[in-house]
Image (cartoon, rainbow, N blue to C red):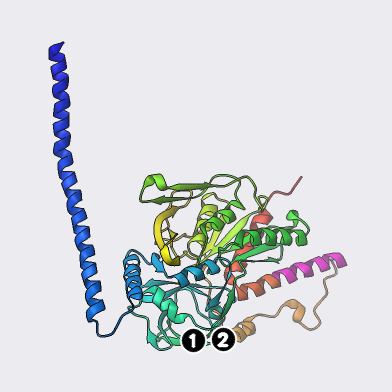
Amino acid sequence: MKKFVMAALGGTLAGIVATTQIAGPLVAQEAKNNASVYEQLDLFGDIFERIRAQYVEEVDEGELIEAAIDGMLTSLDPHSSYLSPDDAAQMRVQTRGEFGGLGIEVTQEEGFVKVVSPIDGTPADEAGVEAGDFITHVDGESLLGLTLDKAVELMRGPVGSEIIITVVREGEQEPFDVSIIRDTIKLTAVRARTEGTSVVLRVTTFNDQTYPNLKSGLEEQIEEAGGIDSVNGIVLDLRNNPGGLLTQAIKVSDAFLDEGEIVSTRGRDPADGDRFNAEVGDLAQGKPIVVLINGGSASASEIVAGALQDHRRAIVVGTKSFGKGSVQTVMPLRGDGAMRLTTARYYTPSGRSIQALGVSPDIVVEQPRRATTEEEEEENNRRSRSEADLRGSLNNDSLSEDEIRQIEEDRAKAEATAELREQDYQLAYAIDILKGLSALAPADK
């Protein structure tokens, strides 16, 4: 028994010695790292004092510190930044859907400001700014080397004032100037209308009003159509939608799903991850859905498109989305400022991270460039005449008046679709898909 006790004690002592031998270097390494951090902070303090005392002009100490904080955050990724008290207040206003500006969502790439998307009906949209444009100058002043916040600050100004931005666009040989008049931006989160028998829900942003607007707009269109049986499907148009609130993206996805995961987020610590699941209730009542996306569809738009695509609840049509698959948390700071920090990546239900990759559509459909007037005239001249256009052609006497009326109504619908195809090819393509699915659907017995 004594030998057993001694052996046990010996094992315990050996374990303590081994643990001490391992922990010792770890503790020493941690202490060394802390000392290095404190040395760097001392270096920052030294530089700050020298700037304050010796810079050629007197500096604002508060602005200097804010610039240092912003530089630290923006060095991490394009979406982390410091928000001054004014910027933080403006961000809170924007999530409510009304603010002053040009009406563009921007990011930074290769030192220049890149347009993620223009917002429908805003000055930038009406001036012809497109997703993917690079803004190199504002009123002749170069943006190269400026932080994104500083570049955005240059684009702000009083409502009614003019701004001239210099744009570099793929396919254009030379940069060109665009004149924009600043205005108050009032965002209509969702515009609902009916094309033929298809309900089109144009979602422009994800703010506090998005889900309520979508729900009421869809219900109104269904009622005007005479009930859900008179609707062949829904087009959810997310093109040039730069995103917004994660909570609204989850609600919009949930609006068309009865069950299953919508999105998950995973941060640095696996324990901090979240999963968001759908609840019973499909506003579309099982009707087919086509989701439209393009390179200006980002963030919350990609969450919705990815969720509906993974659950095979919708066919995704258009071009590859922007690829912003990260989550930013806004953290209040002392003095009414805030810090926007990237804290997680989000994943679609199948486990896809779309960060930098985007959502790939099921059917790739490019939006063709608008034809010039001369091209349109040439196309019209090429169209051949029909038998009915010939003088003295025979009438069709095999059809009743009701049958002829039905044919004419069908022709009018087809011509309306053709006209829509000239105006918005991608949307017309989506509506054609719904028509095809409706034609293949089994008739009710």
Give the position of the C terminus as an image quadrant.
Answer: top right
**Viewer-side residue, 238 vs 213:** 213
Q: Is residue 335 magenta?
A: no
The dominant secondary structure in magenta is: helix
Residue at far top of view: 1
Asked whether 421 or 76 is in front, the reply is 76
Residue 264 in percent (x, y) is at 46, 49
Q: Where residue 228 appears, x then y in whole percent? A: 73, 54
In the foreground, 138 or 14: 14
Residue 160's disc number: 2
Q: Please, is residue 204 above or below residue 304 in the view?
A: below
In the rendered view, does 135 fall on the left or right side of 392?
A: left
| Apparent side of residue 147 relative to residue 132 in the rendered image (left or right) | left
Determine whether 47 is above or below 362 in the image.
below
Residue under label 1: 163
User: Which structural element holds mark 1?
Assistant: strand
Residue 256 x/y as whole percent: 61, 52
Residue at the image point whose x is 64% and y is 55% from the top: 437
Residue 132: % across, % down: 45, 74
The stretch in magenta equals 398-414
Q: What amino acid type should be assigned to the residue bearing mark 1?
A: Ile
Quarter of the figure with residue 196: bottom right
Up-down relation of residue 102 to residue 221 (above or below): below
Q: Amino acid at mark 2?
A: Gly
User: Contact, CB < 8 Å: mark 2 with mark 1?
Assistant: no
Which numbered mark, 2 or 1, is in the foreground of this view? 2
| Mark 2 burial class by Cα count in 10 Å: few <14, some 14-19, many 20+ | few
Along the line of sight, the residue nearer the viewer: 442 or 401: 442
Query: In whole angstroms, how far apart are the C-alphas of marks 2 and 1?
Result: 10 Å
